[in-house]
Image (tube, rainbow, N blue to C red):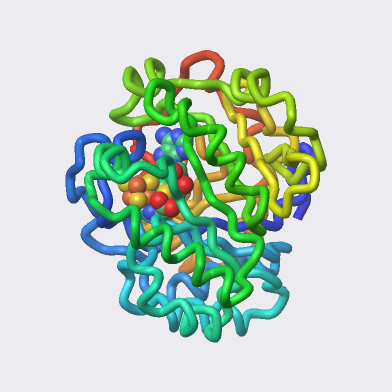
Amino acid sequence: MLDSYKRNIDYLRISITEDCNFRCKYCNPNGELNYSKKSISKDEIIEIVKLFSELGVKKVRLTGGEPLLRSDLIEIIRDIKKIKNIEEITMTTNGLLLNKNLLELKNAGLNRVNLSLDTFNKSKFKEITGVDGLDKVLEVIGELELLEMVPIKINCVLINKFNNDEIKNFINFTRDKKVQIRFIELMSMGDNIEWGKEKYLSAEEVLEKHKDLKLYKEENVAKIYKLPNSKGEVGFISPNSNKFCSSCNRIRITSEGKLKLCLHSDIEYDLLKILKSKNPLTELKNIMLTKPKEHKLGEEKYIKKNMVKIGG
Ligand code: SAM
Ligand code: SF4
């Protein structure tokens, strides 16, 4: 559906758990196992997706926390796949557990995966995530290629004095592989506000140093570049330096079943209550019309929750 600013909202991101097997410094900085006591059930997820599909949602992304920790993930994907109008199901994952059931996930209806990877260095990987898992995550890239779940998107958060010396390696990774590296500007929120400010590195700075990257296309919130003759692509998602709110086509659902119309707003709506109301569709339509025009990150208005509780 079109919102009040004529943006076509067709993309739903659902966090299916707040639990995570990593403790990334920018996402879950205190490393607590601070997960919600109860995540939305599979049946609630399906009811919610059905409702949004009636409002024009076509793409669903499963996220978390770590979505692979959910034991009924295959059934969730299978049941979403059956919903009319849903054209694509994707998942964002840290990849550690992905090699266990990738084929099963694909057969259930998972189209593609975004893998999170901020470094190619084993000890830096452990430093940023708290887990010694780089080898397993790299293996998964080969498996995604074999299963032709391409383009494989790799989310890399730009972190000053941590991975700026590896940016060239990430860009070169796209020369021979059908991958899309997606550099994401670090966002300050929750418990990471000071760390986030200190470690911030803008997409502009990176582009300034890599003039061989040429703008190729725009994809909703991302600007996509390419090296000459490369198989892959390099995307930049710059919520801070290049506000993309006017092309934001997404809404988010937390693992507690709360609807977030904007990532950078603390306002949430209780979907489980709405599902039980007399006319959920009308109620939801009215709420969707309140999606804010833009975020206030530039004014240093940061949200209270950590990203692990929202899903990115
Ligand atoms: N656990 C999964 C993973 O890591 O891919 C899915 C959830 S994670 C919250 C989704 C994405 O958000 C990841 O790619 C992560 O790098 C990104 N992210 C988390 N916190 C962030 C922050 N403060 N700024 C920018 N990106 C962030
Ligand atoms: Fe977990 Fe993903 Fe957040 Fe890392 S980025 S702590 S893997 S939810």
State whether residue 266 appears in this view. Answer: no
**Residue 155 percent across, percent down from the top left:** 52, 46
**Residue 120 percent across, percent down from the top left:** 41, 44
Identified at 74% across, 40% down, the residue is 227
The image shows a total of numbered marks equal to 0
Q: Is residue 220 left or right of residue 305?
A: right
Viewer-proximal residue, 135 or 309? 135
Identified at 30% across, 45% down, the residue is 122
Q: Is residue 79 above or below residue 97?
A: below
Viewer-proximal residue, 58 or 203? 203
**Residue 270 percent across, percent down from the top left:** 43, 54
Identified at 46% across, 20% down, the residue is 301
Identified at 47% across, 26% down, the residue is 164
Viewer-proximal residue, 193 or 149? 149
Q: Is residue 303 above or below residue 287?
A: above
Quarter-wise, where is residue 150 in the image?
Answer: bottom right
Q: Quadrant of the N terminus?
A: bottom right
Q: Is residue 256 above or below residue 236?
A: below
Ligand 1 image position (quadrant): top left
Q: Is residue 309 left or right of residue 158?
A: left
**Residue 65 percent across, percent down from the top left:** 35, 54
State whether residue 285 appears in this view. Answer: yes
